[in-house]
Amino acid sequence: MANKKSPNPIDVHVGSRVRLRRMMLGMSQEKLGENLGITFQQIQKYEKGTNRIGASRLHHIADVLTVPISFFYENAPGRSESASGGFAEPHSASYIVDFLSTNEGLQLNRAFSRISDPKVRRKIVDLVRAIAGDGEDS
């Protein structure tokens, strides 16, 4: 029998996707809670996976965050590519989700996307690769 004290990996994954999307929109936990008629503490519990999100609540969250419900299950643990219907992003791209789940990743992504000069963008990529010690060319 599963340990009652540790959250289910699917609940943790769905919660992290709620957090990712909320952060992508620049929305606070308090604002999301207001839109759903619940407290920000409940949002925290959902995002950590300590409380499960019911079907109707997940539907409401998807509406507020303007994503399809399937967004919350992309790259979920234990899902094979055939189970995803071929539309899910490859599992190897999960590092992108991990990166965008951090405050730094989100800030870098927002700032970088505001740079209009392609030469400057390329130089920034080169700089970051040099700092990281990654000599790979793309």
Image (cartoon, rainbow, N blue to C red):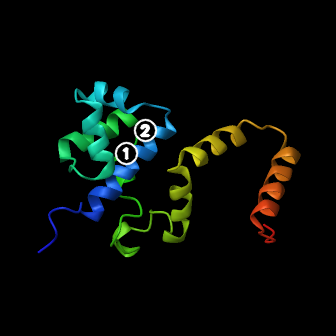
Quarter of the image for residue 135 reads bottom right
Secondary structure category for the residue under label 1: helix
User: Residue at 29% of width from left, 24% of height from top?
Assistant: 34
Q: CA distance from mark 2 to mark 1?
A: 6 Å
**Three-letter code, disc 1:** Val
Q: How many marks?
A: 2
- The x, y position of residue 107, in whole percent, is 62, 41
Horizontal side of 67 relative to 41 (left or right) equals right
131 up-or-down from 62: above or below: below
48 up-or-down from 135: above or below: above
Residue annotated with mark 1:
18
| Crowd rating for badge 1 (residues with CA inside 10 Å; few <14, some 14–19, many 20+) | many
Q: Quadrant of the C terminus?
A: bottom right
**Three-letter code, disc 2:** Arg
Horizontal side of 36 relative to 127 (left or right) equals left
User: Residue at 44% of width from left, 43% of height from top?
Assistant: 21
62 up-or-down from 100: above or below: above
Circle on res. 22: 2
